[in-house]
Image (cartoon, grey):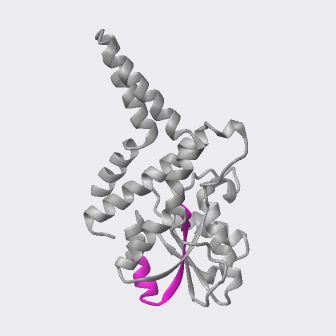
Amino acid sequence: MLFTFKKLISAFIMPLPIGLFLLLIAFIFLMKNSYTRGKIFLFISLLWFVSFSSQPIANALLKPLEDSHKALLEVPDVKYILVLGSGHNTNESLSIISQLREVAINRLNEGLRLHKLIDNSKIIVSGYKGFDKNHHSQMSKRFLLELGVNKNSIITMDKPLDTRMEANEALKIIGKEKFILVTSASHMKRSMLIFKKLGLNPIPAPTYYLSFEVGDYNMLFAAFNLYKSKVAFHEYMGLLWGKIRGFI
């Protein structure tokens, strides 16, 4: 119940829903002939959308999160590589790569890269079903199997619903020994705090960086920048929630 409530609230406290809510307030004032207030909220709405769809502001929000841990270039000698869950959409008429979302593919490819560099390592993949018929962990396993990973080198965690639950399940498998933690660069700061709080010893391997400059005038204001702002909002909300709940 608490998980559903958290997801529902976080879905609305995002740049796009907040911007639409501001527009709704402006519309209500205009319908009531309160033109001054309506104009004020229209201006605030415009400023809101311009700000969070702009490349400089979106990158400024994301960069502190993505720079919290460096990319893992010198590979340590560990047994486990944990790839945190992301998302997918089951469609049997498509290949497994097309069913996994871009974030998931990036994380899994990074895990696969590290697995190939570390002899006898095992990849742990995680993720629940959500509204889909298949667990994300099983879809991730299919992806790894098709790319040549031995089935005995893959461990699945089907139950975790969020990062803290993933950390709890990982603790049962890995214990206190060092392991590589793979997740999006923006998500790494929160993940490391949660895992360390529970006594695990993760080595960060961030991937899927978004706070890059695109030298194209079309990208100065774009939906992709609004998406980057959304990712940043999600992580800052997660950090705040974690502190309130004592998870980090």
Left or right relative to 127: residue 1: left
Tell me the quarter of the image containing the N terminus.
bottom left
Residue 60 or residue 183, whichever sits in front: 60
Residue 62 or residue 235, whichever sits in front: 62
In the picture, residue 37 is in which quadrant?
Answer: top left
Question: Up-down: is 238 above or below 39?
Answer: below
Residue 178 among magenta residues:
yes
Any part of residue 129 in sight: yes
Could you tell me which residue is drawn at 43 percent across and 24 percent down?
Answer: 43
Could you tell me which residue is drawn at 37 percent across and 54 percent down?
Answer: 237
- Residue 112: where, in percent of width, then height? 67, 74
Left or right relative to 17: residue 76: right
- Residue 27: where, in percent of width, then height? 37, 18
- Residue 50: where, in percent of width, then height? 52, 33
Residue located farthest toward the top when viewing the structure as drawn: 33
Question: Up-down: is 220 above or below 198?
Answer: above
- Residue 19: where, in percent of width, then height? 42, 33
Left or right relative to 27: residue 77: right
For the magenta stretch, what is the residue range?
169-186
